[in-house]
Image (tube, rainbow, N blue to C red):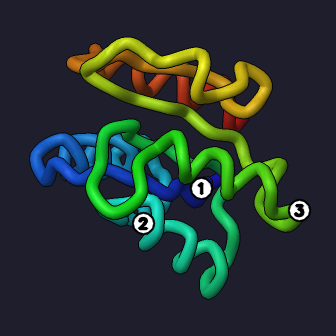
Amino acid sequence: MQKKILIIEDEYDIASTMELSLEMDDHEVRLTSNGREALNVLENEALPHLIISDIMMPIMDGYEFTRELRENKRFSNIPLILTSAAQLNQSLVNKKDYQAFLKKPFDLENFLETVSKIVS
């Protein structure tokens, strides 16, 4: 069954690679480039089965996005994968608020396996 996945990534090449990989794996993908844009999509479109969010982004970073996501009852149970080229700052995000962290650059096979485990 096709799953809807929201990607929040400001680097076009990374976003398009993730999008293509997920679409080839039979998922419906929606791209956004920052946390604020993603929250707007969540408010106005059908909720996704999974959100994949970069940490370092303009306008609203992944830490702030995660806090706002989890504070909203409507969105609080959507699974979340965080990604970053930097280490995850555990003081800025609670382990219970995300299902996986992938350090960039990540292996596409591992990426798809992680997504599959969460949405299946």
The secondary element bearing badge 3 is classed as: loop
The secondary element bearing badge 2 is classed as: strand
Q: Nearer the viewer, residue 107 or 12?
A: 12
Amino acid type at image mark 2: Arg
Instruction: Tell me the residue that label 1 is attached to.
Output: 2
Can you say whether 57 is above or below 31 in the image?
A: above
User: Which residue appears farthest toward the left when viewing the image?
Assistant: 13
Whichever of labels 3 and 2 marks the residue nearer the N terminus, that label is 2
Disc 2/disc 1 C-alpha distance (Å): 13 Å
The secondary element bearing badge 1 is classed as: loop
Q: Position of residue 73 (x, y in %)?
A: 89, 62
Dot label at residue 73: 3
Q: Residue at x 46, y 17 (%)?
A: 88
Q: Nearer the viewer, mark 3 or mark 2?
A: 3
Count residues near mark 3 (Cα–Cα under 10 Å), then give few for <14, some for 14-19, many for 20+.
few
Task: Name the side, left or right, on which 7 lies relative to 51.
Answer: left
Amino acid type at image mark 1: Gln
Instruction: Tell me the residue that label 2 is attached to.
Output: 30
